Amino acid sequence: MPFVSGGVVVEEIDEVSWRVLEAVVYQGNEQLFTVEKGFVTDFASVPQIFTWLIPRYGRYTKAAILHDWLWGLADRGGIERADADGIFRRAMRELDVSFLRRWLMWGAVRLAAVRKSGLSTLWHPGFGQFAAFVAVLVPGFLFVLVPGLVVLAALGVFYVAESVTFVLLKIGGGRKPSGTPAKKINRPSFPWTSS
């Protein structure tokens, strides 16, 4: 039940969004899922503070595109989110994503489903799925907590340094004879989710 299509062909829309230029086709247990040309994805929706562990794209990119599409299908009532998440995990296994990485990613999308649809989504697939979620989430949380806090602190320090630099450049950045700034100065932003 692997991906039927070839590689991933996309074009960049902005710093986090990409448009699929060739269909991504996946054969499930009973259904053929086709992510059509033109679909917009953000690959793996990983907050910036966790990209040290799970980058936004990698061996699992096809599975991430499929999962984004399946969640859109779930929004339209065509599939349950728990099933979409299970297909995501299975697709990652078929793409040879390591056991721990795919289970952490599955736990993260199950957590995102709770945020989007409420706690009842954890119980809907049954107690076994809930138990698996807890078994993945608790050690996963403990594993990423300390490094995540270190990365968050480093991002905060960098944001402060960028902000100070921004202010200094705005004050003394120099002007052309026309009165316009010599160089464009971009306002810093704290990178919670964007790269």
Image (spheres, rainbow, N blue to C red):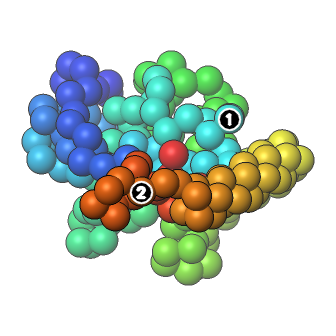
**Residue bearing mark 2:** 175
Q: Answer few, some or many: residues within 10 Å of disc 1's Cα (few below 14, many 20 plus, some between 14 and 19).
A: few
Is 110 positioned to the left or the right of 176 in the image? right
- Residue occupying image coordinates x 52% and y 54%: 173
- Residue occupying image coordinates x 54% and y 62%: 170
Residue 126 shows up from this direction: no
Q: Identify the mark nearer the N-term, 2 or 1.
A: 1
> Which residue is nearer to you in this view: 128 or 194?
194
User: On screen, 131 above or below 143?
Assistant: below
Quadrant showing the N terminus: top left
Q: Which mark is residue 52?
A: 1
> Which residue is nearer to you in this view: 195 or 123?
195
Where is residue 58 shown, x and y percent of the image? 47, 27
Indicate which label's residue lies in the foreground, 2 or 1.
2
Is 23 positioned to the left or the right of 154 in the image? left
Q: Inspect the image, locate mark 2, and give the three-letter code of the amino acid beneath it.
A: Arg
Q: Secondary structure at mark 1?
A: loop
Q: Secondary structure at mark 2?
A: loop
- In the image as oriented, which residue stretches furthest toward the front? 177
Where is residue 95 shown, x and y percent of the image? 44, 22
Q: Inspect the image, locate mark 1, and give the three-letter code of the amino acid beneath it.
A: Trp
User: On screen, 27 above or below 64?
Assistant: above
User: On screen, 36 above or below 57?
Assistant: below
Q: Answer few, some or many: residues within 10 Å of disc 2's Cα (few below 14, many 20 plus, some between 14 and 19).
A: few
Is 49 positioned to the left or the right of 63 in the image? right
